[in-house]
Image (cartoon, grey):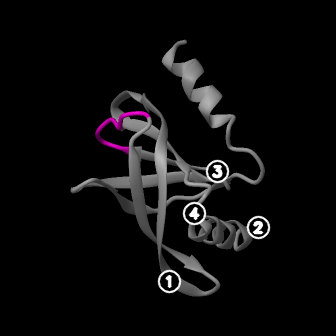
């Protein structure tokens, strides 16, 4: 499978409501912290850009600030890397599949999705 086909198949996993969601934040993997820029979000996957590649299947935690219900909130989500594709000189497009067993993840994602038109 080509990288482009892999990206499109992974992006198709964004079932349900998918919205543009541009925030700067950080991703923590073990003891390493990496800067990220989110691009879009759905109930299952958070899409983001980052400068370094991430290994598929790697467990990670995402942290970023956003406006929800008129308040600035810091969100903490956990998941695993679903895909990672080089996007020219822009860096790597990475999809983080949310940990569906984590109720806190589901609540925070629902809060973000419900606050957007």
Marker disc for residue 49: none
The secondary structure type at the circle numbered 1 is strand
Task: Indicate the position of residue 8 as horizontal and vertical percent values.
Answer: 62, 27
Marker disc for residue 44: 3
Instruction: Name the outermost residue toward the top.
Output: 1
Name the image quarter holding the C terminus: bottom right
Q: Residue at x 29, y 39 (%)?
A: 52
Residue on which disc 1 sits: 72
User: Could you say which quadrant of the image residue 13 lies in?
Assistant: top right
Label whose residue precedes the other's in the sequence (1 or 2): 1
Q: Residue at x 64, y 65 (%)?
A: 106
Given contact means CB atoms under 8 Å apart, are the residues at marks 2 and 4 in contact? Answer: no
Residue on which disc 4 sits: 102
Label whose residue precedes the other's in the sequence (2 or 4): 4
Magenta segment boundaries in residue numbering: 50-56
- Circle 2 crowding by C-alpha within 10 Å: few under 14, some 14–19, many from 20: few
- Circle 1 crowding by C-alpha within 10 Å: few under 14, some 14–19, many from 20: few
Front disc: 1 or 3: 3
């Amino acid at each position: 499978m080509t990288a482009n086909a892999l990206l499109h198949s992974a992006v198709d996993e964004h079932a349900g409501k998918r919205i543009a969601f541009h925030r700067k934040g950080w991703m923590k993997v073990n003891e390493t912290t990496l800067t990220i820029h989110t691009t879009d979000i759905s109930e299952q996957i958070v899409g983001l850009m980052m400068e370094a590649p991430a290994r598929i299947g790697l467990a990670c935690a995402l942290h970023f600030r956003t406006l929800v219900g008129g308040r600035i909130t810091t969100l903490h989500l956990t998941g695993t890397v679903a895909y990672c594709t080089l996007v020219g000189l822009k860096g790597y497009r990475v999809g983080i599949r949310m940990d569906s067993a984590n109720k806190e993840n589901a609540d925070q994602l629902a809060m973000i999705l419900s606050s957007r038109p």
